[in-house]
Image (cartoon, rainbow, N blue to C red):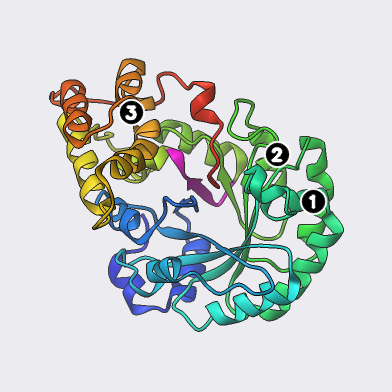
Amino acid sequence: MHLSGKLSLRLNPSETFLQLLRSPAPVLSLAPMQDVTTLEFMRVIARYGGPDVYWTEFFRVHAVSHLEKWILKSITENPTGKPIVAQLIGNDIPALVRAAKELQNYPVAAIDLNLGCPAPIVYRKCAGGGLLREPQRIDAILGALRDAVTIPFTVKTRLGFESPDEFDALLKVFAKYPIDLLTVHARTVKQMYRPGVRYDLIAQAARELRCPVFANGNVHSAAQAQKLISETNARGSMIGRGAIRNPWLFDQIRAQFRGEKIRLPVGRDVLAYIRELWENEITPGVKESAQVMRMKKFMNFIGDGVGEKFLHEIRRVATTADFFRVCENHLAHDEPMTLEPVAISEAALDLPAAF
């Protein structure tokens, strides 16, 4: 069982978040995904059951940065009734401290430091996953932020930059500070989203650290999520691309843990979800071609659960009419769909976003 919406509304976000971490049920969270986990996407996901906790896209922090208004909007207008964690990315300690203090004036459940973004444009600036090459610098950042943050402070990391062998040294740094949660994406930065997820190292983190650990990386079905959480002793799971593909996944995982039958959507349900995404992602005044291109970003993930032929066709549409023609051709049916990945191409794996 997860905390009810009524309890979430009665308590402040930090108290709700801490109660979730202390509760016996596994905690499910939506991963921070740049240019995806917007207010609009959160609103859609919440209508399908949604996670217990949401993460924002990362706030880009540097010497002259300001908190991005569109990300703040997902906090101040949070439509989910669930706690939301604000994520920071950067390496300038005074700027990170300034941003963390400012964010604590808003209704956030926690402040999170991004040590996992694998985008070259980010890691080349020694931010996100790029910081994993400099454990001493991470040490200094964690110390400064832990002192500055009076609400829960969390970290999202990868196993290392080049190799999982780097993880032992990183764990020693994380263990020095009373962080409230560590989320481990069980790949390296250089690995991006390719196969070879090291769930055994999530289990190591859960054994060695005093704080709870969330398992992250290629969570794609209710049965697999249950197995992953049970075998790693993780406190919960953070789901990114799998939630884009299958917004029913959070409720399916809850049903799996309760021993209930998993409800599978039919093709028309998936089609309705795509229409809802379209309606929420429309930006007034944006050209039709740009709107179609934005939706293709989502379709790369949804398509992995539909099939290669669908992906091939949807990636080539240029108009709204063609977009929905392809969707209807493949999804206007009443057959149940697992939405598990049927084929993952290299093109779909090399993604520039912080998933």
Q: Quadrant of the N terminus?
A: bottom left
Q: Verify whether residue 239 appears in magenta.
A: yes
In the structure shown, which secondary structural element does the residue marked by tag 1 occupy? helix
Instruction: Identify which residue, 86 or 150, lies in the foreground.
Output: 86
Element type where label 3 sits in the image: loop
Residue 269 position within the rendered picture, expressed as x and y whole percent measured from the top left: 18, 35
Looking at the image, is mark 2 or mark 1 earlier in the sequence?
A: 1
Report which quarter residue 329 is drawn in.
top left
Residue at the spot 39% in from the left edge and 66% down from the top edge? 74
The residue under the point 71% across, 60% down is 210
Residue at numbered disc 3: 339
Residue 46 drawn above or below residue 109: above
Q: Nearer the viewer, residue 350 or 112?
A: 350
Residue type, label 2: Leu
The answer to whether residue 3 is seen in the rendering is: yes
Foreground mark, 2 or 1, reads: 1
The amino acid sitting under disc 3 is Leu
Check disc 1 and report the residue beneath it: 170
Q: Is residue 284 left or right of residue 15?
A: left
Depth order, front residue of 198/333? 333
Among the 4 quarters of the image, the one containing residue 217 = top right
